Amino acid sequence: MTQKPLYILVHPEDNVAIVVNSGGLPPGTEFECGLVLTDFMPQGHKVALADLDEGASIVRYGQVIGTAARPIRRGAWIEESLVRLPDAPELDTLPLATAVPPDAPALDGYTFEGYRNPDGTVGTKNVLGISISVQCVAGVMDFAIDRIKKELLPKYPNVDDVVALNHTYGCGVAINAPGAVVPIRTLQNLARNPNLGGAVMVVGLGCEKLQPERLLPAGVEPSIVTLQDERHQGFGDMVASILEMADRRLAQLNERRRETCPASDLVVGLQCGGSDAFSGVTANPAVGYAADLLVRAGATVMFSEVTEVRDAIHLLTPRAIDEQTGRALIREMRWYDDYLQVGSADRSANPTPGNKKGGLANVVEKALGSIAKSGTSPIVGVLSPGERATRKGLLYAATPASDFICGTLQLASGCNIEVFTTGRGTPYGLAMAPVIKVATRTELASRWHDLIDVDAGRIATGEASIEDVGWELFRLILEVASGSKQTWADHWGLRNALTLFNPAPVT
């Protein structure tokens, strides 16, 4: 059966719409409204709904995403080169805490089966994590992890996995530079992720700038193996010491059992990667709906990615719970503006070639779709990169847009489960936390049937509503957090490396 020509108009004031049909539509195609295409129109790309003069505003989501680089006829394909990038919102004149919070009742009675930690946090996995203080020991750590998995882990059936918190930091860096606080704080908080059970173990070299003790929380009994320790007689002794330390901790983790916990103990990270023009109308709004449900249930929800928020910041500062929170949002935007300027870059470096192929003309259009993940709840807090979440509700956790750095920083902020939307597709996964993949298009969900967990593309064709998919995702989050359902990323053991954000100099 041939699907009738369909397009999506997001806002009544929009003068562009995106084509829904898989494979695109040929010139001459006529929609029910009488619009006729003058060009071949790829799926997800924008069609002009009216004649546009050169310099005219191009409007999507009810917002100006750019201006016309030349006259554009009604029915024409508005491809990337026809959209001039507008100026970013001015940070000094943004409205702060002016939005009226939605009147949404609390959601009571929703629970999941999790691992309660001594500090009150809850894990969705039971994982042994071992930190390193410097990249020099990463090879030894990998060797030891392989031994631990083969020789020790089978003795402890209640432990899900063993993970090395490897990284490329620790020495040859300006350890006291102001920017060094970011990678150091990130490493400190990664080791405290709820899914690791609360105990911090470190393998260090001994001569590095980032001494292992700096990764331990205050008052914690040291659990450190130093490879330069003179008691080690060769490589075998080093590895044996790591295995001995791991064995003690595995025995402790093996005693943990899942218990019924309220949904308010969830800390959910929201992220997108391989975005397309459908991201802001299918997957991200569905995730936003689920985010609102989680907030109503008392959970912590964090959204991130500064460059994919910056051009929509004027829509977020009004949602700040108070002026102080609004100013904190602005602080993170300004910090990143300065960071990019120092590197002789700007926001036009985002989006990617794949984003553009999926219909996103520029970072403004991408940002307007990205923030849909945040739903409608008030923003109650702002985290600088790598800071640990300490309150419930919707948080903005500042990170770069890089999937790998964002995921690492969200883990450091305490996320115990992540939801990841994609339009182009990515096999991204994390070892420390489950990652639920949500596809923006049914075509992708069908083709990647054993990588995608939720098909939000049904929203585009009218087979499901944003509310339907939002509730589906909310329930799936509880199931995955309980260990009763496995994500495809965990099924296949897909895991990306931890990637630190280091804005400080390397010496």
Image (spheres, rainbow, N blue to C red):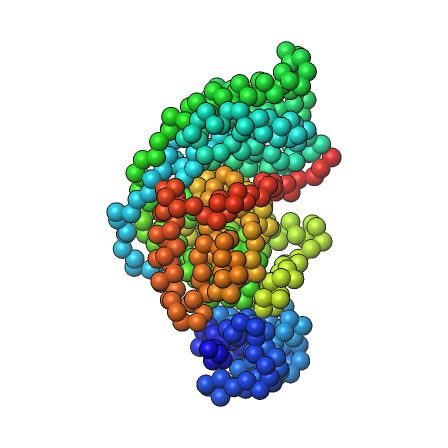
- Total tally of numbered discs in the picture: 0
Q: Residue at x 32, y 52 (%)?
A: 296
Q: Quadrant of residue 235?
A: top right
Q: Position of residue 493 (x, y in %)?
A: 53, 42
Q: Position of residue 220 (x, y in %)?
A: 47, 22
**Could you tell me if residue 354 is visible in this image?**
yes
Q: Quadrant of the C terminus?
A: top right
Q: Position of residue 468 (x, y in %)?
A: 35, 62
Q: Position of residue 342 (x, y in %)?
A: 69, 50
**Could you tell me if residue 396 is visible in this image?**
no
Q: Residue at x 62, y 24 (%)?
A: 204
Q: Residue at x 45, y 24 (%)?
A: 155
Q: Quadrant of residue 319?
A: bottom left
Residue placed most toward the observer, 442 or 171: 442
- Location of residue 223 with respect to 114 vertically, above or below: above
Residue placed most toward the observer, 123 or 505: 123
Left or right: 275 in relation to 100: right
- Location of residue 212 with respect to 462 vertically, above or below: above
**From this viewpoint, which residue is outermost toward the bottom?**
34
Residue placed most toward the observer, 136 or 362: 136
